[in-house]
Image: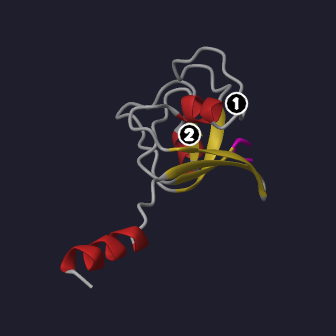
Amino acid sequence: MSAHSVNAEKTTKTEVVRPVVRFLQGPNLLGQAPYVAGNTLVEHAEDADVKIPTNCTSGTCGTCMVTLLYGEVPLPEILPPGLDDYLVEQCARLACIGMPNGDVDIDIRPPL
C-alpha cells in the first residue's frame, strides 16, 4: 500500500462536524439549521422551517423572545427595551437581534 492511499484512507474517516442551531419546544425538536456566522436566530429558524413570531425586528417589543438552553448568544452592551436583567438571568434572548456563536439549542418558548 502506498503512502498516498494510507493518507486518503485517513482523511475519509475524518468527518467535519459543522455547528448547528437547534430549535425546540420543550423536549420536542422542531427543526435545526447549519450555523451561519452573522445570521440572527430568526434567520436560522427560517432556514429550519421554524416560525418565530416577530414584530419590530429591532429588539424593542420582545415578541421574538426565546430561551437559550445551550451555547452562546451574546447580548448587546446596552440591553434593548425588549429585555431586562431579570429576563437575561432566565436565559432570555431576542431572536430578531440575537446572533449565535456556533452550536446552540433554543427553546422557542420565552422564559416563565
Q: Is residue 46 left or right of residue 80?
A: right
Could you say which is closer to the camera, residue 21 or residue 106? 21
Which quadrant would residue 66 be assigned to in this image?
top right
Q: Which residue is mark 2?
A: 93
Whether pointer 2 and pointer 1 mark residues with C-beta atoms closer than 8 Å, the reply is no
- At 62% from the left edge and 20% from the top edge, which residue is drawn? 61
Marks 2 and 1 sit apart, C-alpha to C-alpha, by 12 Å
From the image, which quarter does the N terminus lie in?
Answer: bottom left
Residue 76 as seen in the image, left or right of residue 62: left
Q: Going 65% across and 38% down the picture, which residue do you hit?
A: 48
Image x and y of residue 73, in percent: 46, 45
Q: What x and y, as percent, mark residue 23?
A: 67, 46
Task: Determine which residue is flagged by label 1.
Answer: 52
Q: Which residues are magenta?
A: 108-112
Indicate yes or no whether the magenta region holds residue 111.
yes
Which element is circle 1 on? loop
Residue for point 56% across, 18% down:
57
